[in-house]
Image (spheres, grey):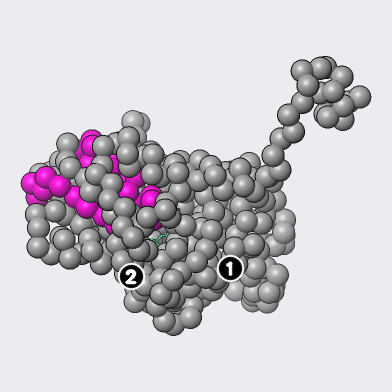
């Protein structure tokens, strides 16, 4: 069967009708990859999977929400959209707006966007407005603009974004045959954890799964408002995608945590980089730093004994753990280059090269 994107696949769960023009780049249907190396780290009773959302059309999970937000904007005859963004939302909105023939404005915090994301917004023809300030400042401005002018906000405050993003939880259930026992993910503006939790609950209500996962969210130590219980004025982390000090969906993230019996914790930048390298070197998966947060969280909880102390008999084995990898590594090539040793430049001499390879 031809795959036509998340709206067609899950339309009975989405706020669309026959009248909705479907603007799609065939997002979704991303692989759930068994992580053998990470699995062995935790123990025999566990199976770890990676939901590789970096394989969406613009390289991040945002496309799931954007197809619904832009399709509905189109249905409502909008001609322009705007978002504030740490990068991925701007890339996605620019691409989907281009497909829909709409104007796209993006407000970005000056100097804080990874190169790949910025290039996407530019090449898709968005009007890129760099603001002196952080993401939270940019989002406030975007909200003010959309309250007064005929421009549709496509940040995750737009409920259609959440609706689209919840399809990732449906895919996980469809692939595993049930919901996982634990789901780990990064938390920035907190729309995605809100979307997954909504999706898991709806799928269970419809009888498509019999359980709900514990939602385990992670923020970067220097940008952890939910963990600290207060907004952070100057958030700091190398994971620029989640450098957010006052998440818009704070309340619903806390609900997801508490209703599921999960947690929201921090990981340090060093832990993020270690997980980033481990994913690339041991699992063959290149993600951006914010996405490595899920795996950094998994390693942290494993070290803390979180999984060791579980009442194993209460579970159907193996216990399924899913880490969400939200964005592709090529989004932030500069971070990858900064993380590795620079290659030495060699003479074009066979002996010299073979020596470097360890064969001579
Ligand atoms: C790769 O693009 O907020 O908790 O403006 O790009 O739903 O915000 C991006 C967020 C995780 C956090 N991983 O998701 C934006 C933006 C990646 C991201 C998140 C983002 P939310």
Q: Alpha-carbon distance for marks 1 and 2?
A: 20 Å
Q: Residue at x 31, y 53 (%)?
A: 130
Coordinates of residue 164 in the picture (x, y in percent): 30, 53
Coordinates of residue 148 in the picture (x, y in percent): 9, 62
Coordinates of residue 226 in the picture (x, y in percent): 44, 76
Residue 255, located in which quarter of the rendered image? bottom left
Q: Secondary structure at mark 1?
A: strand
Determine if the magenta segment contains residue 344. no
Q: In front: 24, or 338?
A: 338
Q: Is residue 288 above or below residue 119?
A: below
Q: Which residue is mark 1?
A: 267
Q: Which residue is mark 2?
A: 249
Looking at the rendered image, the quarter that the C terminus falls into is top right
Q: Is residue 260 left or right of residue 292?
A: left
Q: Residue furthest front?
A: 132
Q: What residue range appears in magenta?
A: 76-100
- Confirm whether residue 191 shows in the render: no
Looking at the rendered image, the quarter that the N terminus falls into is top left
Q: Residue at x 62, y 47 (%)?
A: 338
């Amino acid at each position: 069967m031809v795959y036509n994107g998340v709206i067609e696949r899950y339309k009975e769960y989405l706020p669309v009708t026959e009248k909705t023009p479907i603007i799609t780049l065939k997002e979704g249907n991303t692989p759930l990859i068994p992580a053998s190396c990470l699995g062995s780290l935790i123990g025999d009773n566990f199976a770890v999977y990676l939901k590789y959302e970096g394989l969406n059309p613009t390289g991040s999970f945002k496309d799931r929400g954007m197809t619904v937000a832009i399709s509905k904007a189109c249905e409502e005859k909008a001609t322009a959209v705007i978002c504030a963004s740490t990068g991925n939302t701007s890339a996605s909105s620019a691409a989907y707006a281009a497909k829909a023939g709409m104007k796209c404005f993006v407000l970005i915090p000056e100097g804080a966007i990874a190169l790949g994301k910025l290039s996407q917004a530019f090449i898709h023809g968005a009007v890129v407005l760099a603001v002196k300030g952080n993401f939270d400042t940019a989002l406030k401005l975007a909200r003010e603009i959309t309250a007064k002018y005929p421009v549709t906000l496509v940040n995750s405050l737009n409920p259609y974004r959440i609706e689209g993003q919840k399809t990732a939880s449906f895919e996980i259930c469809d692939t595993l045959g049930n919901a996982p026992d634990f789901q780990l993910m990064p938390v920035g503006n907190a729309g995605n954890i809100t979307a997954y939790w909504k999706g898991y609950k709806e799928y269970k209500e419809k009888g498509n799964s019999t359980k709900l996962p514990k939602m385990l969210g992670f923020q970067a130590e220097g940008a952890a408002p939910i963990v600290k219980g207060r907004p952070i004025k100057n958030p700091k982390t190398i994971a620029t995608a989640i450098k957010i000090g006052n998440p818009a969906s704070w309340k619903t993230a806390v609900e997801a945590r508490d209703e599921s019996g999960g947690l929201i914790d921090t990981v340090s930048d060093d832990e993020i980089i270690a997980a980033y390298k481990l994913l690339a070197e041991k699992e063959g998966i290149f993600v951006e730093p914010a996405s490595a947060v899920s795996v950094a969280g998994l390693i942290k909880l494993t070290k803390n004994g979180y999984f060791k102390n579980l009442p194993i008999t209460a579970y159907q084995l193996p216990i399924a753990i899913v880490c969400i990898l939200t964005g592709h590594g090529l989004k932030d090539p500069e971070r990858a280059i900064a993380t590795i040793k620079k290659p030495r430049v060699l003479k074009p001499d066979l002996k010299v090269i073979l020596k470097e390879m360890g064969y001579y």
